[in-house]
Amino acid sequence: MEKILVVDDEEFIRQNLDRILREEGYRTAGAKNGQQALDFLKDASFDLVFLDLRLPDISGLEILKKIKESDPDLLVIVMTGYSSVESAVEALKCGAYDYIKKPFKADVIKLIVKLALETQSLKREVFSLKKQRETVLGSRLFIAESPAMKDVLMQVREVARHAETTVLVTGETGTGKDLVARSIHNLSARANRPFIEVNCATLPVNMLESELFGHESGAFTGARGRKIGLFEAAGSGTVFLDEMGEIELGLQAKLLRVLEDKKIRRLGGTQLHEIDVRIVAATNQDLRQAISAGRFREDLFYRLHIVPIHVPPLRQRPEDIIALSNHFLHEYARKFSRAFQAFAADAQALLLSYRWPGNVRELRHVVERICIMHDGQILGPELLPKELAGQAPGSLSAVDPIVFPLPPEELKLDEMIDRFTLHLIEKVMKRADGNISRAAKMLGIPRTTLRYKLDKYASEAKSRGSSW
Ligand SMILES: Nc1ncnc2c1ncn2[C@@H]1O[C@H](COP(=O)(O)OP(=O)(O)O)[C@@H](O)[C@H]1O
Ligand SMILES: [Mg+2]
């Protein structure tokens, strides 16, 4: 329930307001002077303040200004005695929500508080709506023709029914993890509450922390005013932590606590605030591997892993390739006023044989590009990008057939480059009959560099059982 602070030096007024507000179910606290009020406001989370303008120590206007500096959104209703209306007007100018004259009637107080809090909650809703504006799902289609995706859809339906359960969505980039997360939200009891997406990889760690948890004023340099974090702004909705594998270890510890207690502490704050959100996390990383590498906390993994949903790569779901291509073709044909009806059989064959490293996202873009550039009834293979037909002309493989085996999934670019370099060096060393100087010349690098790389890769080469 909302918490209201009553600031007045007259005990009678405090008690009176206290009684009226408690009758309505609000929680209250009372301060008998300005200093006490400021102490209360320092870390407690009030939703509204009744503020007497004439206090014994600090003037009410001063207090109002301080409040508005540190927490511009906090509602303040000022109270004036028989004194002038001017001070009330001055207070409104300084950001007070409204003013009342003493003596007041209980009904008026109840009404004014109700309206003020409703306005406040609407404001918060607008804030979170703005946050999710670009990511609203509407009723986007979830295509699931393959047995694997039908299974995923079933899991989505099942977990949606349990509005508290944390979900971990895994899968390569572009497989549909966002869509899964949104669908869980949309099918759940939280559907008409906000869905807030946070990409953990794009924000620097300290910003991510204050985005998620919010901060009190002065929590760090540049922290002006109090800010509500996304966990609080999501009010009874869903927080989608995308690219969870990128979160830094310190923040992982804090998230673990959030998951366990469903409570958060704003940066620089002392008070714990209860939150009521479902957390859906997603990653394209192998978190078990990240755990062994010391980059991910095992306890957090198990906390997230309660309901894991894995979205398989597109190349493993031929039924979906066809269904999705048709779906995107109709979507973009309509959008760009094209006459495309279907894919030709040999175009379908190409779609099916391609590896789709970028998964559904790549497929969507391929179809979109075709519909922007071309028109026709039946979409033939000649309109598909070259890489779908196998080799791009002029690629390395056309000049010199160096066969590089496809790396196992989830290999990092650096590791892939390392392996490729090793592979290339092996070949060139063979061709140069083991002569380092000649091999270095062929590779166009200094001999010392090659020497260094050979040393670096020697152990790996040994373990792979090859020799120069
Ligand atoms: N099963 C599906 N049905 C319809 N569209 C899909 C499906 N899976 C993915 N998409 C679309 O493919 C694109 C990439 O999906 P997204 O959920 O953002 O992938 P990820 O989050 O795994 O990178 C989005 O435009 C999404 O709407
Ligand atoms: Mg995504």
Image (spheres, helix red, strand yellow):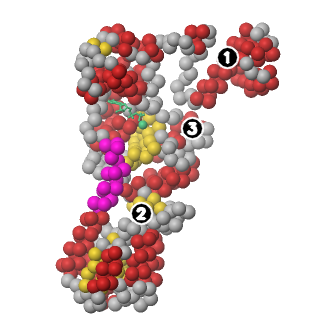
Indicate the position of residue 165 as horizontal and vertical percent values: 37, 46
Measure how far apart labels 1 and 2 are at the Cα level.
Answer: 57 Å
Q: Which residue is mark 1?
A: 424
Q: Is residue 239 above or below residue 170?
A: below
Q: Which residue is mark 2?
A: 273
Q: Who comes first in sequence, dot 1 or dot 3?
A: 3
Q: Which residue is mark 3?
A: 290
Point 26% across, 21% down: residue: 338
Q: Give residue 402's mark.
A: none
Of the pair 182 and 126, the residue shown nearer to us:
126
Q: Who comes first in sequence, dot 1 or dot 2?
A: 2
Horizontal side, residue 61 vs residue 161: left or right: right
Q: Residues within 10 Å of mark 1 (few under 14, many from 20)?
A: some
Question: Magenta span has 131?
Answer: yes
**Residue at disc 3, secondary structure:** helix
Quadrant showing the N terminus: bottom left
Ligand 2 picture quarter: top left
Measure how far apart labels 3 and 2 are at the Cα level.
Answer: 31 Å
Q: Is residue 340 above or below residue 80?
A: above
Question: Magenta span has 240?
Answer: no
Main SS class of the magenta portion in the image: helix
Q: Who comes first in sequence, dot 3 or dot 2?
A: 2
Indicate the position of residue 80 as horizontal and vertical percent values: 30, 85
Please name the amino acid that badge 2 sits on.
His
